Amino acid sequence: MSYTTLAGRTAVITGAASGMGEATARTLASHGVRVALLARRADRLTALANRIEADGGQALAVPADVTDAASVDAAAERIHTAYGAVDLVVNAAGVMLPNPVTDGRADEWQRMLDTNVAGALRVIRAFTPDLIAAAAAGRTADLVNLSSIGAHIAFPHYAVYGATKAALTYLSQSLRTELGPRDVRVTNIEPGLTDTELGGHIDNAELATQLDGMFDALIGLSPDDVADLIAYATSRARHVNLRQAVVLPTRQA
């Protein structure tokens, strides 16, 4: 599908080394968006940037860690030097580490909080002035947060992950009250079962097997499915905000 209104825009995409972030970068670039790719794995970012440019797009690999404020600020400076102000931000960086709360895995809790919640906030702090300025100049400005159906549906042993995603969903809702009156759109997307690297982070064999069984039964989404939804939402007329989208595999209730 063609989203011609995206051409000429400039996007920042976190979590761009894999999964939904990578797919979003490829999809937006294919529609004429200059994409700044943020993630920790520099080699993956460079390979993706090369692939996008070989296909005729524009991409900038910017290794950064969203859990580190100084790293995010340095990334923003580099992007502004190379591309100027941005008008589209996609918070796709995330980590999912399920385990029973009674295991007391405080290190995992902190990692999920630092990445899924505070990481998104660091990126928002770095680029919201760009979005506000773009909107004030009459251009389309978008902030897209990738949450999860886990923000609403409780799954055993995913309590902390779900809580971080519920926080991101609420943050998106609240930010609309601040940014909407300034013509900046905020879109919150909650995918269901999606085939990404998140499952590979699980160190609990029982939960990993359970997740594999869900994929066998439900036929999960691909990252490209979610990326296409992001492209659709951000290509609407600037007065139209697709504020909340839950996207699930057809078989997932």
Image (spheres, helix red, strand yellow):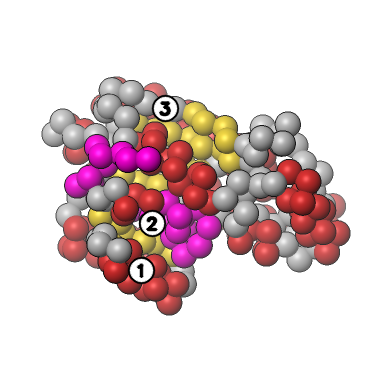
Name the spot of residue 248 as percent of width and height, x first. Answer: 62, 37
- Left or right: where does residue 129 sit relative to residue 20? left
SS label for mark 1: helix
Q: Which of marks 1 and 3 is in front?
A: 1
Residue bearing mark 2: 26
In front of the other: 100 or 242: 242
SS label for mark 2: helix
In front of the other: 26 or 112: 26
How many residues crowd mark 3 within 10 Å: few (<14), some (14–19), many (20+)?
some
- Residue 43's disc is none
Rendered image quadrant of residue 107: bottom right
Q: Residue at x 34, y 49 (%)?
A: 28
- Left or right: where does residue 217 sit relative to residue 183? right
Residue bearing mark 1: 51
Q: What stretch is highlighted in magenta?
A: 1-26
Lower sequence index among marks 1 and 2: 2
